[in-house]
Image (cartoon, rainbow, N blue to C red):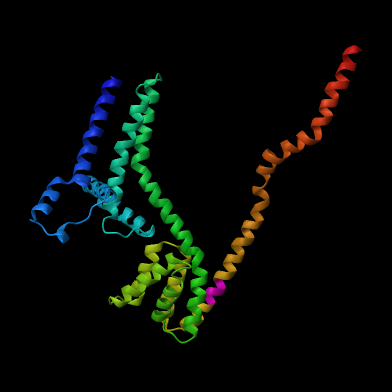
Amino acid sequence: MPLLFTIVLFFGIAVAGATVGMRVYVRPKEAMDRVAGSIEAHDIAPSHPSLAFHDLIRRLGNIIPQSPKDVTVMQRRLIRAGLRGEHALRTLYGAKALFGIALPVMVASAVLGASTDPGNKFMAIASAAALGFFGPNEYVRRLAQKRQKEISRGLPNALDLLVVCVESGLGLDQAILQVSKELEHAHPEISEEFGFVNLELKAGKRRVEALRNLAERTGVDDLKKLVAVLIQADRFGTGVAQSLRAHADFMRVQARQVAEEKAAKLGVKLIFPIFFCILPSLFVVTVGPVAMIIVRELLPMMQSI
């Protein structure tokens, strides 16, 4: 049975590889048409194996049924991860289908010939299928968390620069555009988000709606607070510069409190590394020579008595 499965898998991979090679690399029909002059050179779109692979993943993503609720959640997660391409959702579902099939097949080919319990083999194959299917979701989630941390890290600098721009006489829209340009290299994530706000304003959206979309896209709590401050200042007619200055002071105090909280927790977190890593080596250095002297000299004396 394992031999038959290996032969079938080998022929399947060989046929798939030959088909992809003929379509991507060789392409005899296009070469014959080009020599015959039936098509123009500029009509031939250059292709690459990576493009063919991406196209395969998108087609697999179109095959998988998608629930509207899951699609909404995954689209929001992809946007927060910075993946805003037209085919991002289909690529994600295609990757889930591809890895959900490929990983169990690879694990099955590795464990079927082993002399282990059938239950363990089944668990290994099922674990590989779960890892392949849910792994892309976890990758996107971690990518979104990393991007949110980068936005939170660059927000204080962006807020200070926004305060400077507004106090120098620029309007809020022009200040957001200027901050987006200035932070393009230092903090590209928050620069990109401010750039989207500027594009939405140019497209005709109201400022309140564009700012709310900014908070919804990123999902960062500090940015949501900044958006709330700007919306309230715009609604009640208060000074934007004064509101931004007060919010910047609040964020500095909050950052100082967070740093003090982490410093207070440091002593408790160091207990376990000290107890398990430092104390054993300290006991070996201090008590070890005394124990060796006792074993070498005291025990023979006690036995002679």
Q: Left or right? Give the position of 241 relative to 61.
A: right
| Residue sitting farthest toward the right | 305
Frontmost residue, 212 versus 38: 38
Q: Magenta region's main secondary structure?
A: helix
* Residue 256 drawn at (x, y percent): 61, 66
**Which quadrant of the structure image shows residue 231?**
bottom left
| Residue sitting farthest toward the bottom | 169
Q: Is residue 75 above or below residue 127?
A: below
Question: Number of callouts in the render?
Answer: 0
**Which quadrant of the structure image shows residue 195?**
bottom left
Q: Quadrant of the N terminus?
A: top left
Q: Left or right? Give the position of 155 relative to 87.
A: right
* Residue 218 drawn at (x, y percent): 40, 63
Which segment did they paint magenta? 246-250
Residue 66 in sight:
no
**Residue at the location (85% across, 21% down)?**
296
Q: Left or right? Give the position of 293 relative to 265.
A: right
| Residue sitting farthest toward the top | 304
Q: Left or right? Give the position of 209 relative to 161.
A: left
Q: Is residue 268 above or below residue 12?
A: below
| Residue sitting farthest toward the front | 35
Q: Quadrant of the C terminus?
A: top right
Frontmost residue, 235 versus 91: 91
Question: Is residue 248 magenta-colored?
Answer: yes
* Residue 6 drawn at (x, y percent): 29, 25
**Residue at the location (62% across, 59% down)?**
261
Question: Is residue 288 magenta-colored?
Answer: no
**Residue at the location (21% across, 38% down)?**
18
**Residue at the location (46% across, 56% down)?**
146
* Residue 17 drawn at (x, y percent): 24, 38
Residue 249 in sight:
yes
